[in-house]
Image (cartoon, rainbow, N blue to C red):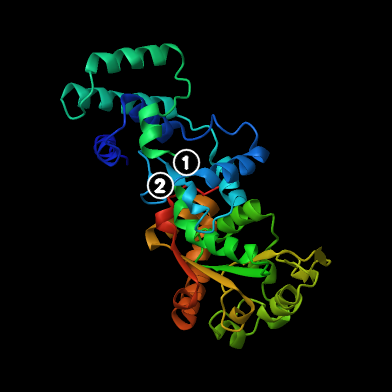
Amino acid sequence: MSDTRAFLLAHAAAYPALTLADLFKALYQSAFGCEHLVADPSAAEAYIAAEAEGARPCGRESVEPLDGPYVRVHLDMLKKGLSARTLARLFALSAEHRDGAQVEFEKKLAVLTEMIRQGELLFDADEAERAISAWRAAGFPPCHHSEAFRQAYAPAYRLVKAAYAPLLPLLLEIDARLAQGKRTVLAIDGPCGSGKTTLAALLARLYDCPVFHADDFFLRPEQRTPARFAEPGGNLDRERLLEEVLTPLRQGQPVSFRRFDCHSLTLLPPVAVAPSSLAVVEGSYSLHPELTPMYDISVCLTLSPELQRRRILARNGEAMARRFFERWIPLEQAYFDAMKPQTRCSFLIEADQLSDEAPL
């Protein structure tokens, strides 16, 4: 839940040279994000790279929260290793219409005008209300920073969804490796409902990389023995994942793997995947100790039991969710307790911090 009053006070303190127009812009961005700005996503990368070249150091945190589901990512992130392409794609993925944004925006403006009336923000209240009325009559078109703000702070940033902010250290690491020409295999492990598939899909959209799913490597019937199920993480066909996917990925060779069909309990015809500078393996048990030497970057997602239950019920329905709670989650928990991937990973990311909304 946003606190518009606290945000406005903090924003005014951080930017003492701001004008009323800059507060309008901050609230506009907080509600509407960047939906009006991405007319040509393919050109965004070049614009970002060129703007970053001449940008002054921002002198504050590179990621600046707003009063809503967006953050400003300052372009000095590019000097820290984030690529212009990655930021451009995050920016484009963040440009979407939000239902209820205008109602939310009006509420924020009401808070602003009341704070001015009460003397908490030192602007002329009548002037503010006249400006808002004219702006409303025009349909609330996008607004701009004041010249005073530009001169004092030289703003250079892009808006992205706040849900992406906890992922930026991971994206910096990926971009650093790719910039050095290093072939990279990345694994994402975590409990049911933690967002492994969603994160893998986001990486695929950002980097045009292949994604391999642990769900395609369930045990074949002849492997399903009591001894195998007694092993922590034993219900993944890690031998076949290693042979068909991870070994050729490490060698920079084409991959040919077979998906396991849970209905027929057979292996489907081979799927060919060309070599790529980045490849992602996602799914529970993917950070099994027998597999981790094959990865360059490892991610483990965590989440609270309450969020896990809510997500599984929403995703699978009550009948199917019962199978997760009674069978699959206890097997996963035995694996996490025994193998502790959360202590061996490159990045530990709490799904609770990403919000309930899928980051896509």
Q: Compared to 254, does 69 lie above or below?
A: above
Left or right of 356: which side holds 283?
Answer: right
Which of the image's four quarters has the N terminus?
top left
Image spot of residue 217 (x, y percent): 68, 71
Image spot of residue 238 (x, y percent): 66, 79
Could you classify mark 2 by the number of other residues whose Cα lies within 10 Å: few (under 14), some (14-19), or many (20 or more)? Answer: some
Image spot of residue 327 (x, y percent): 52, 71
Q: Residue furthest bottom?
A: 227
Residue drawn 38% across the image and 12% down it:
134
Q: Which sits earlier in the primary sequence, circle 2 or circle 1?
A: 2
Residue drawn 56% across the image and 85% down it:
231
Viewer can see residue 26: no
Viewer can see residue 80: yes
* Disc 1 element: loop
Q: Residue furthest left?
A: 118
Tell me the tag on residue 58. Answer: 2
Left or right of 159: which side holds 245?
Answer: right
Residue drawn 62% across the image and 80% down it:
291
- Count the marks: how many? 2
* Disc 2 element: loop
Three-letter code, disc 1: Ala
Q: Compared to 113, does 161 lie above or below?
A: below
